[in-house]
Image (tube, rainbow, N blue to C red):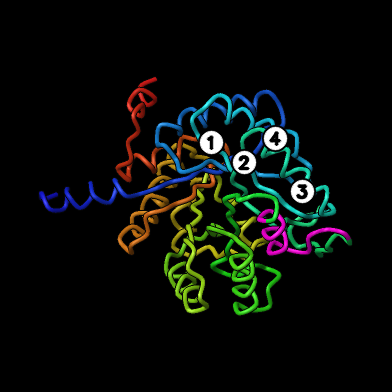
């Protein structure tokens, strides 16, 4: 690498921003794994770390406990996911107030999946927020929160077409959303075309790409079918035959995600949201390969 290439790589790493998504633990072992992951990734100084919220508020207390602990024991800025499935407006507002009381000022506002799971018919609560746009408006009425929302480069599975999908995103932004985070994708051309559509629709908030490191290709492939994310043939070939070889699979997964993010950086993207699945190792390796270093990153790596 010549001196100009090294300087360019350094410049890009200095402007790259990251955020991480975690889910609340269900038991003591999972809680230990979560906090090991948070501790390992914290030195990268993420813009924020988000904590998911189960359908119909099924993980409300674990989510609340997790973000409260992040607020009290770390210097990280937590964002709490919030959905409106199965609850009236007063109940959703009360939950938002609970999160605010422990120090949360950033919400990832989502309509949420039906309690029966992805693919089931969605039925708004009679007295609730009907969709993500109404939820954003309700949060904005409560306080001057930072509000992130979802975006779908391959459109939401329930949307009949891109026009309908992007119209919903515009409604969420018009209601007060400050950022959109995408569903994971593996083809950067799809993301780039989506951003072009969004900009043509007059939407100018950041469209942050959601990056999913592949810990288990079979699981990712099955989930992708449910949520409408495509798996390129070249990606399937990368993992072919590695079902019983976790070490090689992890190396391939790190390389795939780093290649994807590096390509996005070359296209002018500098903000990334990682779906960690509460497992830090792959995300740590990817961030390191991108040139990111935190004040304590070398200590964490040696520990």
**CB atoms at circles 4 and 3 under 8 Å apart?**
no
Q: Earlier in the sequence, mark 1 or mark 4?
A: 4
Disc 2 vs disc 1: which is toward the camera? 2
Q: Secondary structure at mark 3?
A: helix
Q: Residues within 10 Å of mark 2 (few under 14, many from 20)?
A: many
Q: Residue at x 85, y 54 (%)?
A: 88
Q: Main secondary structure of the magenta part?
A: helix
Query: How far from the left and from the top, in percent, is residue 85?
Result: 79, 55
Q: Earlier in the sequence, mark 1 or mark 3?
A: 3
Stretch in magenta: 127-140
Say which of 49 and 187 sits in front: 49
Query: How far from the left and from the top, in percent, is residue 1?
Result: 14, 49
Q: Which residue is mark 2?
A: 51
Q: Secondary structure at mark 4?
A: helix
The question of residue 137 being in magenta is answered with yes
Q: Quadrant of the C terminus?
A: top left
Q: Residue at x 72, y 55 (%)?
A: 112
Q: Residue at x 49, y 30 (%)?
A: 75
Q: CA distance from mark 2 to mark 1?
A: 14 Å
Say which of 243 and 197 sits in front: 197
- Tag on residue 279? 1
Q: Earlier in the sequence, mark 4 or mark 2?
A: 2
Query: How far from the left and from the top, in percent, is residue 125?
Result: 86, 59
Q: Which residue is mark 4?
A: 64
Q: Secondary structure at mark 1?
A: loop
């Amino acid at each position: 690498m010549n001196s100009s290439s090294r300087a360019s790589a350094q410049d890009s790493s200095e402007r790259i921003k990251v955020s991480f998504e975690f889910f609340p633990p269900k038991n003591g072992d999972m809680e230990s794994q979560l906090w090991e992951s948070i501790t390992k990734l914290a030195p990268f100084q993420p813009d924020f770390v988000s904590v998911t919220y189960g359908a119909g508020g099924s993980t409300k207390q674990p989510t609340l406990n997790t973000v409260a602990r992040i607020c009290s024991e770390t210097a990280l800025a937590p964002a709490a996911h919030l959905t409106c499935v199965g609850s009236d407006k007063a109940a959703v507002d009360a939950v938002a107030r609970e999160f605010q009381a422990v120090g949360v000022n950033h919400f990832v506002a989502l309509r949420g999946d039906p309690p029966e799971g992805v693919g089931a018919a969605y039925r708004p609560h009679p007295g609730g927020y009907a969709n993500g746009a109404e939820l954003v408006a309700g949060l904005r009425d409560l306080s001057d929160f930072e509000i992130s929302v979802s975006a779908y480069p391959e459109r939401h599975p329930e949307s009949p077409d891109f026009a309908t999908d992007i119209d919903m995103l515009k409604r969420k932004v018009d209601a007060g959303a400050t950022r959109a985070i995408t569903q994971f994708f593996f083809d950067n051309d799809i993301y780039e075309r989506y951003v072009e559509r969004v900009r043509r629709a007059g939407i100018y908030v950041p469209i942050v790409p959601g990056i999913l490191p592949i810990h288990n290709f079979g699981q990712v492939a099955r989930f992708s079918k449910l949520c409408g994310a495509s798996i390129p043939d070249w990606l399937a070939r990368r993992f072919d035959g590695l079902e019983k070889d976790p070490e090689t699979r992890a190396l391939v997964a790190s390389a795939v995600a780093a290649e994807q993010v590096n390509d996005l950086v070359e296209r002018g993207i500098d903000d990334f949201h990682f779906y960690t699945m509460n497992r830090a190792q792959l995300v740590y390796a990817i961030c390191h390969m991108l040139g990111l270093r935190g004040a304590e990153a070398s200590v964490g790596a040696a520990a």
